[in-house]
C-alpha cells in the first residue's frame, strides 16, 4: 500500500519553475523522474544549470492548493554530473506525499551547498505586531548537499534588528533583541545566536523569541542574520526579513541597493565593494555585510547602533548611515577639519564621479528636498553650526541662527529652494555644431575609391542660425578643430591633411579657422555662407570598421560647442566599443570633462587620445607619453582608474595618485560591457598601464619583436602577448583576474600617502 501510494504521487512530483529563476545558462530547474527503492531513500532526479543551487526539497500532504509546504530538512542533494542532480528523501511510514525541489535564489558561488533562511512568526492580526506581542525569529540552516553543516560548523550566526526605516528614526532594536548597549563588551547591539542562552536549537532550526513590543516607533523593521562557515570564512551570507510594528503600512526606502550597485557592484564577482569587503575584520574581509547595502548598512549604522566613532570632543558618536554615506561621497568637498583629518581622512581624495549635487544619484524619492534636517543637510554642508554656544573652530554659524530641531527647516528651505540650491546648470554652450558626411554609394558604408565630404556648421544657439564660417578667424577664436579618426579598435587620424602629414603637437587636428597667413589654410577646406566643406581623402587601404568625424569650436571666451558623427568603412557592421559609453556614464552620468565640457563618450575621447606615435625620439612615458602627444586612451583610462596603486603615479598625474576605483578593478566588464577584447587581445599599452613597474615593462618589451628597438612604440612592433595571455591561454586576463568562482578577496585599499 505504501509503495503504490508513493508511486502514485511520483507522477505529480513538481518542480517550482514559476517560483524561481532559471539556473545556469538558460537551464530551468526540471524534475525528470522519481523512484522509491525497496529499501532506502526516495530519489528525485532533476536537471538544473551546472553548479546551480543551493536547493531545498519540500513536501506537503495534500494536493489542495492551500495545503502548506514544509521543508524536508534531512533531504540531501548530490550533483551526479554537470547539471544533473539527485535528491535523497528519507521516507518514514507515511502513505502519501507530494514533493517539490526549489532553488534558493542566491547565486553566491562560495556558498558550497548551504545557506540560511530567515523568517518571523506572524502577528495576531496578520499584518503587524502591537504592544505586548512577542515575535519569534526562526533561522533555518539549509545543508542541502548533506555535508553535515549545522550550528556547530558556523563560526558566527549573528542576529540584528533595526527600525523604523526612516533614517532619521532608525535605531538598533536593542529592547526587542534584549541586546546589550555596552560597547565595552561583545556582543553589543546584536545577539550572537551560537552562544546566547535564549536561542533555542531544534535540529537545523535556531529560534529566538524577541521581547514584547512596547514603545518602539511604528514602521518597518528589518531582521538580519549573518552566518559564516568556520572552516572557510569566505563562505558567508547575510539574510533579511521585514517586520511591521505598530502599523500595517510598509515604509518606502530612501535609497536602494540598485542605486549603490551602479558604481559599487562588480560585474564579474557580483560583489558590492564597500568598506567591509576589505580584508581587516578577517583575512578574507566581510563581503556579506556589503551584500545588500539597503538592508545591511542600517543594521549597524543608525541613531543608536553597533557602529560609532569618537567625535572631536572625545565623546563616542553613533556612526549614522546618513553621516557615513554623505561624508564618504562628499570626500574632497568636506570642510570641517575633524572630518578631513579624522572621521573621513581616508576619503578626502574622493571625487564623486557624477556631480555630487545630483541627490537623485542615490535617493529614490524626494525626501532629500521635502524633509530637510540638520542631520542630512549638515553631513554634506559639514561645517555649518546649528548650536547656541560659540561657533567651534573651522565651522560657520547657520545663517538662520541656532536651531534646536528640524520642525521648521522647511520654513526657510522649501523644496523648490532646495532643488534650486542643487540645480546643476547645463554647460553654457554658445554654439551648436553639426557634422554630416555625404552618403556612401551603397547607403551603408564607404568602399575603396570613395572619398566622402564633410559638411560642418556652427550654429548660434541664441538665434538658431548657422554663422558665416568666414567669421571664425584665427586670433578671434581660440579653436576650430576638426578630427577624423578610426577605427574604434586601433584609432589613428585618417583621411585629413593632418593624417597625411602628422605634426609633433599633442593633438592631431585640422585647424579650420580663417588663418592669418593664407599659406596656412587647409587646402581640403572650402567655405560657403554657412558651411565649411571638407574634402576627405579616399578610404582606400583603411581597415574595415567604425570611424568618427569630430568638430569643436571655442570662441575667445566662454564655451563654444562640439559635435560628431560616426561612419562605416568597408563594412556595415558597427564595431563594438571596446570600452562603452554605457560603462562610463553608469558612474559619471552627465558630468563632463576638459575645457570643452565633453561628455564621457569614447568616440569623442579617442580623437585626441589616439594611437598614432608622432614624436619618434620620445621613448618613455616621462617624455610626452611615449611620443603620442597625449596618452592613448587605453593607457590613460586604465592608469587613471588604478591611480592609487600604480608604481609611477607621476606619469598619470599626481592629482590622480589617490584614485581608488569604487570596486575591484579586476571587474573588467564594468567598463568593457560590449566586447571581450579585454580578454582576447591583451596588449602592452593596456596591461602596462596598471602593471607599470619596471619588471612588467621589461617583460612586455622582451615578448615583443621590434625591428627598431630605439623607438619601442613606433608601430612596427609585433607583440606576442596573445601566446600566453590570449583568451584560451593559461595566463589570459580572465584567468589571472579570476575573482568570482571561487571568490577572491579584494586587494588592500589603503590610501597612498602623497606630498601636498
Image (cartoon, helix red, strand yellow):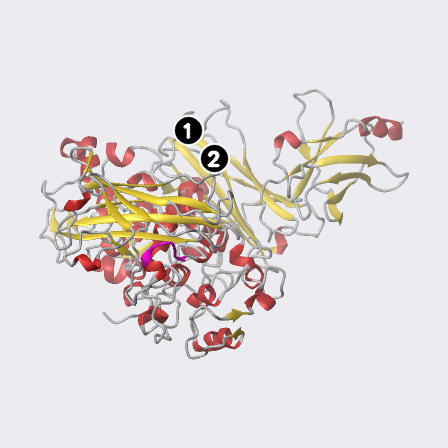
> Are discs 2 and 1 less than 8 Å apart at CB?
yes
**Residue under label 1:** 250
678 and 456: which is toward the camera: 456
- Name the residue located 89 percent from the left edge and 41 percent from the top edge: 39
* Residue 484 numbered tag: none
> Residue 432, how many percent across, how many down?
24, 40
Q: Can residue 625 be seen in this view?
A: yes
- Name the residue located 36 percent from the left edge and 60 percent from the top edge: 500
Under tag 2, what secondary structure? strand
- Name the residue located 53 percent from the left edge and 74 percent from the top edge: 705
Q: Give me the C-alpha separation between circle 2 and circle 1.
A: 9 Å
Q: Can residue 299 be seen in this view?
A: no
Q: In this view, does 752 lie to the left or right of 691?
A: left
The segment highlighted magenta reads 492-497
> Which tag, 2 or 1, sits closer to the chain's start?
2
Q: In this view, does 674 lie to the left or right of 33?
A: left
> Residue 462, how many percent across, how many down?
16, 35
The N terminus is located in which quarter?
Answer: top right
Amino acid at each position: 500500500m505504501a509503495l503504490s501510494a508513493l508511486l502514485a504521487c511520483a507522477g505529480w512530483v513538481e518542480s517550482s519553475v514559476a517560483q524561481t529563476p532559471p539556473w545556469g545558462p538558460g537551464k530551468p530547474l526540471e524534475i525528470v523522474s522519481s523512484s522509491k527503492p525497496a529499501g532506502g531513500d526516495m530519489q528525485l532526479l532533476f536537471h538544473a544549470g551546472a553548479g546551480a543551487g543551493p536547493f531545498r526539497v519540500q513536501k506537503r500532504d495534500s494536493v489542495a492548493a492551500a495545503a502548506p509546504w514544509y521543508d524536508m530538512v534531512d533531504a540531501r542533494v548530490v550533483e551526479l554530473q554537470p547539471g544533473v542532480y539527485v535528491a535523497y528523501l528519507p521516507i518514514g511510514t507515511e502513505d502519501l506525499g507530494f514533493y517539490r525541489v526549489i532553488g534558493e535564489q542566491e547565486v553566491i558561488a562560495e556558498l558550497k551547498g548551504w545557506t540560511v533562511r530567515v523568517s518571523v512568526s506572524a502577528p495576531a492580526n496578520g499584518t503587524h505586531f502591537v504592544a505586548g506581542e512577542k515575535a519569534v525569529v526562526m533561522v533555518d540552516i539549509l545543508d542541502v548537499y548533506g555535508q553535515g553543516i549545522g550550528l556547530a560548523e558556523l563560526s558566527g550566526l549573528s542576529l540584528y534588528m533595526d527600525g523604523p526605516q526612516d533614517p532619521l528614526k532608525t535605531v538598533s532594536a536593542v529592547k526587542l533583541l534584549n541586546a546589550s548597549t555596552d560597547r565595552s563588551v561583545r556582543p553589543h547591539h546584536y545577539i550572537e545566536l551560537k552562544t546566547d542562552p535564549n536561542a533555542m536549537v531544534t535540529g537545523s532550526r535556531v529560534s529566538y523569541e524577541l521581547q514584547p513590543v512596547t514603545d518602539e516607533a511604528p514602521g518597518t523593521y528589518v531582521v538580519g542574520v549573518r552566518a559564516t562557515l568556520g572552516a572557510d570564512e569566505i563562505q558567508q551570507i547575510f539574510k533579511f526579513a521585514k517586520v511591521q510594528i505598530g502599523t500595517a503600512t510598509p515604509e518606502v526606502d530612501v535609497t536602494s541597493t540598485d542605486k549603490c550597485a551602479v558604481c559599487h557592484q562588480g560585474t564579474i564577482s557580483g560583489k558590492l565593494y564597500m568598506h567591509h569587503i576589505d580584508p581587516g575584520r578577517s583575512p578574507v574581509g566581510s563581503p556579506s555585510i556589503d551584500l545588500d547595502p539597503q538592508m545591511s548598512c542600517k543594521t549597524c549604522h543608525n541613531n543608536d547602533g553597533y557602529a560609532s566613532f569618537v567625535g572631536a570632543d572625545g565623546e563616542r558618536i553613533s556612526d549614522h548611515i546618513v553621516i557615513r554615506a554623505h561624508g564618504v561621497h562628499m570626500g574632497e568637498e568636506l570642510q570641517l577639519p575633524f572630518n578631513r583629518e579624522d572621521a573621513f581622512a581616508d576619503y578626502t581624495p574622493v571625487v564623486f564621479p557624477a556631480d555630487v549635487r545630483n541627490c537623485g544619484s542615490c535617493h529614490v524619492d524626494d525626501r532629500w528636498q521635502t524633509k530637510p534636517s540638520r542631520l542630512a543637510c549638515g553631513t554634506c554642508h559639514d561645517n555649518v553650526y546649528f548650536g547656541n554656544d560659540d561657533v567651534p573652530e573651522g565651522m560657520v554659524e547657520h545663517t538662520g541662527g541656532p536651531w534646536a530641531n528640524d520642525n521648521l527647516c522647511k520654513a526657510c528651505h522649501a523644496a523648490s529652494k532646495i532643488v534650486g540650491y542643487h540645480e546643476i546648470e547645463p554647460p553654457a554652450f554658445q554654439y551648436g555644431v553639426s557634422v554630416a558626411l555625404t552618403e556612401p554609394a551603397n547607403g551603408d558604408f564607404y568602399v575603396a575609391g570613395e572619398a566622402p565630404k564633410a559638411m560642418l556648421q556652427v550654429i548660434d544657439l541664441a538665434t538658431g542660425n548657422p554663422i558665416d564660417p568666414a567669421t571664425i578667424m584665427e586670433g578671434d577664436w581660440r579653436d576650430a578643430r576638426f578630427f577624423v579618426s578610426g577605427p574604434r579598435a586601433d584609432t589613428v587620424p585618417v583621411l585629413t591633411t593632418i593624417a597625411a602629414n602628422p605634426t609633433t603637437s599633442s593633438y592631431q587636428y585640422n585647424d579650420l579657422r580663417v588663418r592669418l597667413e593664407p599659406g596656412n589654410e587647409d587646402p581640403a577646406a572650402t567655405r560657403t555662407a554657412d558651411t565649411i566643406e571638407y574634402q576627405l581623402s579616399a578610404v582606400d587601404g583603411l581597415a574595415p570598421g567604425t570611424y568618427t568625424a569630430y568638430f569643436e569650436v571655442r570662441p575667445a571666451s566662454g564655451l563654444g560647442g562640439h559635435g560628431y558623427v560616426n561612419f562605416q568603412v568597408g563594412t556595415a557592421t558597427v564595431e563594438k566599443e571596446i570600452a562603452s559609453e554605457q560603462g562610463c556614464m553608469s558612474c559619471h552620468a552627465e558630468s563632463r570633462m576638459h575645457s570643452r565640457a565633453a561628455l564621457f563618450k569614447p568616440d569623442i575621447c579617442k580623437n585626441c587620445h589616439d594611437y598614432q606615435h608622432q614624436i619618434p625620439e620620445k621613448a618613455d612615458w616621462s617624455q610626452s607619453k611615449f611620443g603620442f602627444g597625449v596618452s592613448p586612451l587605453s593607457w590613460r583610462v586604465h592608469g587613471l582608474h588604478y591611480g592609487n596603486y600604480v608604481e609611477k603615479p607621476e606619469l598619470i598625474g599626481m592629482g590622480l595618485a589617490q584614485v581608488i576605483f569604487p570596486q575591484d578593478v579586476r571587474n573588467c566588464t564594468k567598463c568593457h560591457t560590449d566586447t571581450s577584447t579585454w580578454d582576447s587581445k591583451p596588449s602592452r599599452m593596456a596591461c602596462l598601464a596598471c602593471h607599470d613597474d619596471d619588471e612588467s615593462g621589461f617583460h612586455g618589451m622582451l615578448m615583443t619583436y621590434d625591428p627598431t628597438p630605439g623607438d619601442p612604440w613606433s608601430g612596427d612592433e609585433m607583440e606576442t602577448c596573445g601566446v600566453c595571455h590570449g583568451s584560451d591561454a593559461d595566463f589570459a586576463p580572465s584567468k589571472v583576474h579570476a575573482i568570482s568562482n571561487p571568490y577572491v578577496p579584494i586587494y588592500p585599499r589603503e590610501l597612498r600617502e602623497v606630498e601636498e
